[in-house]
Image (tube, grey):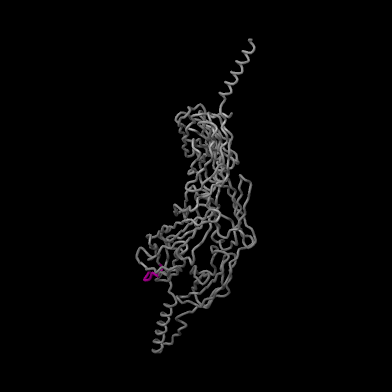
Amino acid sequence: MLLPVVLIFCALTFVGVRTQAPCVPNPVGELELSYDGDGMLTWSPSENCPDTIYRIHIKVHGTVRYEYTVTSQNLSLDFLPYCWPYNFTVAPIADTVLGMENWIEDRFHIPNGTDVAIESLRAVPIERNILVDWKVDPKYTTCVSYYHLVIHHDGAEAPENLHVWEEGYLVQAVAHCTHYKFEVKGYYDYDNTEGTGKEIEYTVPPATNTPSLVEVRQDSTSINTTWRLERYFINRCQVTALYVNGTRFNAAYPVEDTPDRLDIPVSVTGLKPDSMYYFNVTTENSFGVSAPYQIGVQTLHFEYPAQRVTMLRQVTIFALTLLSFGIATSLAQVTCVPNPVGEIDYIAGILTWAASENCPNTEYRVIVSSSDSVMYEFLVSSRNLSLAFLPMCRDYKFSISPVASNVLGQENYLEHYLAITNETDIVVEFLRAVLLDESDVLIDWQVDARHVACVTFFHLVINDLDMDTSVSQRVVLPGYLLQNAARCSRYSLQVRCYYLSEPHTAQLINYTVPAATNKPTLVEVRQDSSTINTTWSLQNYRENRCPVTNLYVNGTRFNATYPIEDVPERPQIQVSINGLRADSMYYFNVSTENNAGVSQAVPLGVQTSPVNPSIY
């Protein structure tokens, strides 16, 4: 009798346990994506359990980027950037029991009729360059295939059309006072739809135009100079006047400025022979008066041919007058005309010539010209002149005229190409690297001014010491812009001159790009009732190589330091904060530290979950 009672009790107890078992929710039905408006993810409900809620995971390349828990059967996707490949996973939860998930993958297309418009466009001067950058709505950045940038500027026959894949472009070597117009449009989606563009006008800030001296020629009573302005491709600011200010004279010379920028001749007359004069030369343009070019010139003690002809005529008249009175005086006894100099030669920087010997106290006027332009003029009593200062690898004409008792004789000349010798070494005297902006490094150098015209090309070698890679470049002008250089990257820079095909001594320097902080980026947040788990990424090694040592998490109720062993791969950093209250809001700042200091903090607010779902 007792045994049946026990069996009945056990059976009733087992039935009671079965009726108290949790309800396992069925998977949701088909997931659908709507691209109208801001986008919507919908699904068919799981209906077998009461009070069912839904957990949504949104993944990018296998990593959970967003997590939500909702009671409805849809989720607005207005927070998602378009054109990324997403994986949407929905799992039902009933009474803390997590059901089987369902998922859908799609690129999350941009809605029909969307206009990816350029929202902002600006131009920022960086030394002699202009950085043009623009922005579109961050939700559409990934959708843009390329940007079409059109650059108009003064003097260009046609606008420049460029396809750009970044949100910016560096216009290099711009001229002061140049007026630009920039137009930008984005082309997006599979069919490269044209978005609404934006345009701005920008004028390069003005600068004064300091003159440079081209030639000085003087006689006994005047100083004749020729001045050159900065070329139009460097400075287009309109020059209106050139000023000459001396201790005994002041003069203004109006300038009719043209794109050709012809040289400006300036004559100062009525001066005393054999006297020293000092004066400043400046120009005025739309920005103001330039810094002065200071010059000192001594007038000569003899007269120029035009004055000598006058003197010769006066002597001749006087001689004829004497003859009319019966006094036989030969004109040859009054004036000695010196014979031309003999053979002219140029050896090892010394110009020599055979003397004019028919007149006593003969001196020699030497004119050095190149490309039909007079460069130097000298008056010497010897039969040689050191010209070791002349730039090499140029054609010169050396004209020599004898001068005796203020009479100028016939000139003789030598045309000569000033070549460098086999022993000459064109050495790079100055080599440096300068960071221009966030990632561009200007490498520039100089050679002896006498050898500039001899350089056929420069051979630049850039060795990346961190990546053990090397880049070689042939450069015609002394300068090169190294773009996208990572912060803290170490380079070995070598420049060598080539004359024709002959290499010369190289110059070598080591350069480290200045350090910059590394602001972390939030990759993922996942939370439950007592824990917040976050994943962070650092600026990649191609952009910032400065070694990161620590990640700091500072909140109102906690502060933590996470040491980092930095490697070139820069793996993501996992940060877990435990022991938190359920259904509570927490705020904290996250920053990193490297050899440039502590980065700007990233603020984050996260609310812990009210429940902790368990998998049945």
For residue 238, which quarter of the picture? bottom left
Position in image of residue 406 (x %, y %): 45, 75
* Range covered by the magenta-colored residues: 267-274
From the image, give the main secondary structure of the stretch colored magenta: loop
Q: Quadrant of the N terminus?
A: top right
Q: Nearer the viewer, residue 19 or 604?
A: 19
Q: Is residue 517 above or below residue 116?
A: above
Side (left or right) of 46 relative to 422: left
- Which residue occupies 47% across, 48% down? 37
Residue 268 in the magenta stretch? The answer is yes
Q: Nearer the viewer, residue 472 or 505?
A: 472
Position in image of residue 257 (x %, y %): 41, 68
Q: Is residue 434 above or below residue 554?
A: below
- Which residue occupies 51% across, 36% down? 68
Residue 387 in the magenta stretch? The answer is no
Side (left or right) of 399 relative to 273: right
